[in-house]
Amino acid sequence: MLAANEFPASAPPVAAGPLLGASEAMQEVFRLIERVGPTEASVLLTGESGSGKELAAQSIHDRSLRCGGPFVAINCGAIPAGLIEAELFGYEKGSFTGAMRAHAGVFERAHGGTLLLDEVTEMPLDMQTRLLRVLEMRKFYRVGASMEFAADVRVIASTNRCPLQAVQNGALREDLLYRLAVFPVDLPPLRNRGDDVDLLAEHFLAELNAQNRTQKHLSASARMVLRQHTWPGNVRELKNCIERAFILADQTLELAPLIQNPAVKGGEPGEAERLEIRVGSRIYDMERSLIEATLDYFKGNKRRAADALGCSLKTLYNKLNGYSQSQECASG
């Protein structure tokens, strides 16, 4: 990966650690990272899924005084509610059934370094209360322990939701938001980054060529697709698309066949794809109808559906499991 200091001083940097981009939007992100990196301020990273929030967190860590310490990331939306306390703070042997030995949580494992709380808006509210206390007191208890541990970590949080809307919807405590968002950084979607799509595509292709000792290249039509597609899955979608095209190509990469199917393309529903809801419908029924219609539109692709709905994949699975259980009870 190219480093910013490898370019002439007169040219804008195209990289900040693992982040890559030459657009004005990314230049602003690089500027904010350079400013906040050496501080101890809590950072809240916002942006759509696949826009590079974890890479931005890594870049902040690399520029901090804690760069010699560990960088630990945890996805708050991927952990069952009953286990998240143990994952965050650890537990003692025998503290609950199945605890055969003591376990260090992410706050311990990140000691002296940086902890990324990804999808923090998916954390249960009761745990948000506990997290807020730990952030303020800088101390925590393992589950089943009587001795306190020091929370010597810098916390970075991220979410693909609008934080203020999450507060209004009751998914995020307002006091926790202001504790985490001392320094907010918003990652722009790929569709707003102009020529960065070409830059990133060439970068991913160069990495694949180096790994496989090949000299494959993008076709002229593939370069047109790069500009025409809106990339709703952002950089993650682009990287995966380039890798699939690389595997399929003998020498020249074609992208169009890979994004024609809505399940792969993941495009936004157009005017024809609308759902009518009767006034007075129950919120539960409205939500279920919307989720099922979105899944149908994306041909069962749950990750695309979750991105379109603005929730985590774990949340979507939990909703679907709930609908399945309700149907079983009704039929029983």
Image: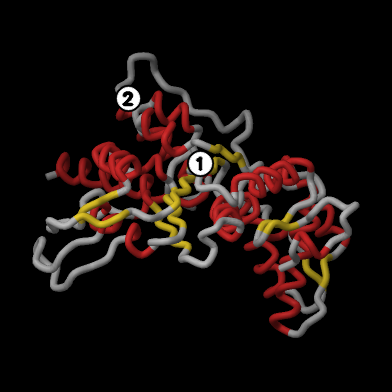
- The residue type indicated by label 1 comes to Leu
- Towards the viewer: 34 or 75: 34
Q: How many marks?
A: 2
- Horizontal arrangement in the rendering, residue 25 relative to residue 33 (left or right): right
Say which quarter of the image contains residue 279: top left
| Residue of label 1 | 44
Q: Is residue 179 above or below residue 202?
A: above
Q: Secondary structure at mark 2?
A: helix
- Horizontal arrangement in the rendering, residue 260 relative to residue 167 (left or right): right
Q: Which mark is residue 283?
A: 2
Q: Residue 86 location, x and y as percent?
A: 23, 57
Q: Residue 166 location, x and y as percent?
A: 42, 31
Q: Is residue 266 visible?
A: no
- The residue type indicated by label 2 comes to Ile
Identify which residue is drawn at 18% across, 46% down: 328
Identify which residue is drawn at 85% across, 65% down: 219
Query: Is tag 1's residue or tag 2's residue first in the polypeptide sequence?
Result: 1
